[in-house]
Amino acid sequence: QRDGIIAHLETLTVHEAAVLAYCLERRTRTVNLPLHNAAANSLVNKGVLRQPQGFVWGTASFTIPAFVWEELQLRKEWFAPVNGEQQRALEQCFQALDRGQIG
């Protein structure tokens, strides 16, 4: 089952990858997003995020399982921008994630 979950890392959408890049950049396995966030829920369905146990004001803490986090540490370069344009786009995604408005 873990191998199947890790395999999903190769089929991420742009928004899913942005959520994981955000966590890597912030050095945290947990991200707070609205319960209805499409990217977070897709990552939950893939097993890459765990469903939240509780929520406040429609926002929940989604968590990356430890074995996925370890794999992400090995693949950090996948999430790194390769030029200034990608860096700016990623920063905009991070700002949207800070507001819970991506995905």
Image (tube, grey):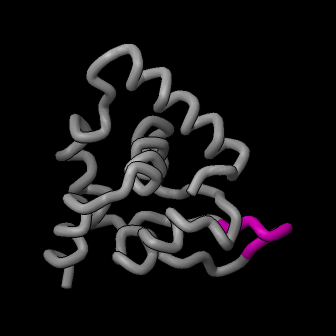
Q: Residue furthest bottom?
A: 1
Q: Which residues are magenta?
A: 55-60
Residue 11, horizontal then vertical, whole percent: 24, 62
Specify the quadrant that holds the N terminus: bottom left
Question: For the point 37% across and 57% down, which residue is it?
Answer: 13
**To which quarter of the image does residue 2 belong?**
bottom left
Please say if 88 is above or below 97: above
In-front residue for pair 96/68? 96
Please say if 99 is above or below 80: below
In this figure, what is the number of numbered marks? Answer: 0
Specify the quadrant that holds the C terminus: bottom right
Residue 35 magenta-highlighted: no
Residue 28, horizontal then vertical, whole percent: 48, 48
In this rendering, would 45 be left or right of 38?
left
Q: Residue furthest top?
A: 84
In this rendering, would 79 be left or right of 103?
left
In this rendering, would 97 be left or right of 56?
left
Residue 79, horizontal then vertical, whole percent: 31, 39
Please say if 9 is above or below 22: below
Q: Main SS of the magenta segment? A: strand
